[in-house]
Amino acid sequence: MRGNLAKAFELANTQVLRSSPLPKSYTDYLGRKLFLFLLTMQGLGAFALITLGVILTKNNVAKNVIHPRIRQEIVRSGVALLPMFGFVALALGFLVVGQAVSVLTKNGAANFLGSTMVIVVVRELGPLLAAMLVLTRVGTANVIELGTSRALGEVEALEALGIDPMHYLIAPRVIGMALGIFSLTVYLIIGALASGFLFAFLQGAPMRLGDYYRQIADALSWLDFALLALKTLAFGFTIAIVTCYHGLAQPLRLEEVSRVAVRAVSQGVIVCVLVDALFIVLYLFS
């Protein structure tokens, strides 16, 4: 059972390189940064494959222990964030959707309303904003919890008891975060679209509710639903992998946990943008 975590540790050993003295030239500095980036990508890729293998091969192992942990992670990454996402949906509806509806209808471009809402809210802002909020709220907690457990030797204690840390600590977080971001994205999109029309109505936009939702429904296709599901699940998977990797896959001291959490969140933002760019390409060529 120690094999999975040992492989992840071996592929994440960049601590010596990070703590070495600063190079004397900019080319050496850039070379070191590039090398660290490649090492990090290698470690993240290996960690993701190991985690995916554990999820697929140990799906039915210790169900009485793992399934409650998965439900707990879904609550933490989804249900517990509903009040915050309700506020964000209202804010998004007021700041973006309501103003867009009002401006388009007043300038005689109401026919473009449906496609604009689908591109801006359904395809881009909704999923990306949901992923960023979960990253900053739950992803940071993942790094701190796992990093502290690693520093205090709790991970080694699990291994001594014959428990695979990848199965017990990582798999529930990955599954819970993926499902949580998917559900919260749907909730955020519906709330933003509904509140957006409300704010546009209060501004006196000359559009009926039926016409508003009919245009959005006509602009949507089955591909939007399929890619929305894939994108949100990909966001959840990659965020969980990045944060768990930085919290678990390197030996840490307690004073290093906060610094590693900042690094994990920064890399999580970059990974989310790259995933979003990949799906933009899929939209363009579909």
Image (cartoon, helix red, strand yellow):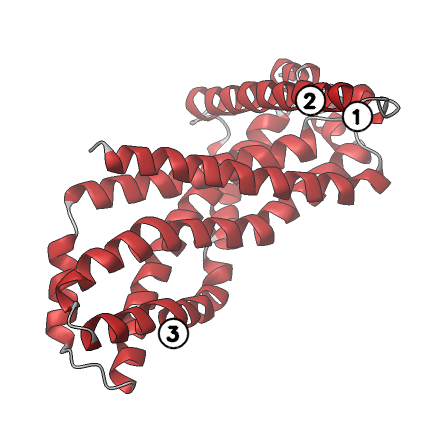
Q: Is residue 207 above or below residue 76?
A: below
Q: Residues within 10 Å of mark 3 (few under 14, many from 20)?
A: many
Residue 172 in picture, x, y percent from top left = 51, 37
Q: Residues within 10 Å of mark 2 (few under 14, many from 20)?
A: some
Q: CA distance from mark 2 to mark 1?
A: 8 Å
Q: Amino acid at mark 3?
A: Phe
Count the labels in the image.
Answer: 3
Residue 36 bears which disc, if any? 2
| Residue where numbered disc 1 is placed | 18
Mark found first going from the N terminus, 1 or 3: 1
Res. 66 in view: no
Residue 269 in picture, x, y percent from top left = 55, 43
Residue at image point 30% right, 44% down: 228
Residue 100 in picture, x, y percent from top left = 29, 69
Residue at image point 29% right, 63% down: 190
Q: Amino acid at mark 2?
A: Leu
| Residue where numbered disc 3 is placed | 94
Q: Nearer the viewer, residue 266 or 190?
A: 266
Q: Amino acid at mark 1?
A: Arg
Q: Is residue 196 left or right of residue 68?
A: left
